[in-house]
Structure formats: structure tokens, C-alpha cells
Image (cartoon, coloured by chain):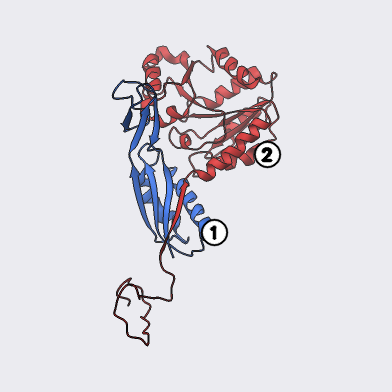
Amino acid sequence: MHEISLLKNVREILEEHAISEKFSKVIKVTLEIGKLSSVEPDALRFGFDVVMKDSLAENAELLISELNGLGLCQQCGQQVELETSYDPCPHCDSPFIKVIQGAEMKIKDLSVI
Amino acid sequence: MCGICGCSQPRKINNRLQPVGVKSHHHEHDTERLVKVEQDLLSKNNAYAEQNRSYFQQHHIFTLNLVSSPGAGKTTLLVETIKVLKDRFPIAVIEGDQQTEHDADRIRATGVPALQINTGRACHLDAHGIGHAITELGVKDYSLLAIENVGNLVCPSSFDLGEAHKVVVLSVTEGDDKPLKYPDMFHASDLMIINKTDLLPYVDFDVERCINYARQVNPNIQIIQLSATKGDNFSIWTDWLVGRVET
């Protein structure tokens, strides 16, 4: 359940931004989670309210935007859609695919007052 | 109540009559705004990991992050490794478990320094804790530092500790399809050790199938098959280490 650790990081990052960006309450947190990252969006949703309790994001809304996996085959050079980070190339069957999208797990933006 | 945003602040009536419109809608409170963040959830851990990595490089400390499911034999592998190599170069061990000092005690019995990190409810070690452990342990220059992570094939794959390599240990008493069941860990590791090979005659573990599965999720993974308790092929592993610690 490392999603709880990740959510604690979210809380720390937004507490830092509260100082630098001068806000006192977070209304909405938007995360960008790639389908190839080892993060389960449902587990993030499950833990969000618990981890944000007594913080400036208590009762904030959590929005998760999921990004599909995309890779570049290192053998045939084609761009391919990936369900996992170790899918072979559907065109030439090479296992050497460089992930170009889908590994993300980041805080995109915050709605604040 | 404000009819536009729903807040409970009463509307201010200006002297000048204005049409009820959004543009002229003012409140005493701050308005909601968007703050761009664009920051990785692991950015803090990754920053600590990079600090650890540069410390290791400056001090010529070759660091491994050993991962496996519970019971694959990480501690026995380390104990036997220390027995063979401790006179060759300094070795230190950081042990991660949810509870107990048992593993660190086993390492200390070999005569090398070990620090136990109890993660409590957490299921993995993180780079910040490792940074503190390095200071506390006083890891020597030109040495081997082995970090034995919490037995868990899921969570530790995401947390860079600053190590040179993740080494995944899989024992033949587990399923040979572990690399497919827990692909993230095998994808993140540079070396897979298949341990307890002396038990192969008694278990239904297909080594070749396991290797194929591991290469399917990580075509670059190196593989060593050994028995830590019986010593079979053990020198392949210790040679692998010596070649990297002494460069």
C-alpha cells in the first residue's frame, strides 16, 4: 500500500506550495497518473481523505487524470500503445521498447483559495 | 446566500445600480484560483536518492538494494556473502523490516556493522531513511553497502534509494511465474538471483520458464542461480560483487 506514502508526499508538496503561492485552502487536487506507473488510482482515492485530514486539503476533491501508455520501439522505430511497460512491439516483436508516456505520477495542479 | 458560487457571504450592494452579472460579482473572500504544480509524487524521495547516490560515488561505496518476497533467503545470502568477502573489503548492511532486530542481529554475528530500520506500518524503505542510516552506520570508503529491503515484491520497486542496482532474489520454493505476477519489481531490477537451487529436485519449479518470464519483463536482466546455504554457484555471485566493488 505505498499509495499512502505517495499521498503523504502530495500533502507535503501542497503544504510547500501553500507558502510559496500564498494560499490557505485547497479545493481540488488534480493528479496525473500513467497507466504504466505502479500506482492504483482506486487506492489513491481510498487513502486521500484519510491522509488529507487536518491539512489544508481536508475535504478537497481529488481528480485523477489517467494517461495511456505509449512507447517507441528501439528496433523498428514505430510508436506503439502499451498496456504494460514490458509489452513486446506489436509490429516486430522486439522487447526493447522505450516508454515515452504512461509512467507519470505527478501533481498537475491545485484549485486553491 | 450568494446565488453564483454558493458561499454564505451576503452580497454587497453598491450605490450604483448594476445588472446582476458575473463580471461585477465581488466578494470579500479570496477567489478560487489554479496553481500549476507539475511535480512528481516521488520527487522528494528521488531528490534524497540522488543525494545518497552522489555520496556513494564520492566515497566509492557500491550499494545494492536487495528485494524479494518474505522468505526468499536475502539475509542468508548476505550472511554467506559476508563470510566470503569480509576480509577483502569493508561491508555494511542496512536491514529493513516492519518489526524486530532479528536480521540485523544475524548480520552483526558475522562481525560487520548492521543497522536495522523498522518501517512500522510502511511496506518499503525510502531514500530519506537510508540517508540517515548511512550517517549512523558510518559506512567506510571503498566498501560494499547492502540494503536488505522489506520483503515485498510490490512497493519497493517504486522507491529509488540511490543504489547502483536493485537485485531481486527469487527462491525455487516460490512459483516460477513470479516475474509475471510482480513484473514491476523484475522490470526495475538489474540482477535476478534464483536461490535455494539445492531444493530443485523436490519442488515443481521450472528454471527455464522462470528465466524466460523474467526476460519477458526485462530483456536486460542478468541472472545467477545459486544455493546460499549449500554454496552451489556461490562464487559466480561473489565474483560479480568483487568485480564491481573493486573498480
Which amino acid does the dot numbered 2 rest on? Thr
Residue occupying the point 42% across, 43% down: A105
Visible residue check, residue A76? yes
**Crowding near pointer 1: few (<14 within 10 Å), some, many (20+)?**
few
Chain for disc number 1: A
Per the rendering, the colour in which chain A appears is blue
Percent coordinates x, y for residue B97 in the rendering? 53, 37
Q: Which residue is mark 2?
A: B135
Chain for disc number 2: B
Q: In this picture, is A78 found above or below B239? A: below
**Along the line of sight, the residue nearer the viewer: B24 or B210:** B24
Per the rendering, the colour in which chain B appears is red
Which amino acid does the dot numbered 1 rest on? Ser
Quadrant, the C terminus of chain A: bottom left
Q: Residue furthest bottom?
A: B15
Q: Which residue is mark 1?
A: A20
Quadrant, the N terminus of chain A: top left
**Along the line of sight, the residue nearer the viewer: B69 or B20:** B20
Disc 1 versus disc 2: nearer the observer: 1
Q: Is residue B133 left or right of residue A22?
A: right
Q: CA distance from mark 1 to mark 2?
A: 31 Å
Quarter where residue A95 is shown = top left
Q: Secondary structure at mark 1?
A: helix
Q: Is residue B206 left or right of residue B51?
A: left
Q: In this picture, is A45 found above or below A97? A: below
Percent coordinates x, y for residue A9 in the rendering? 49, 49
Visible residue check, residue B195? no
Q: In this picture, is B225 found above or below A8? A: above
Percent coordinates x, y for residue B152 in the rendering? 46, 34
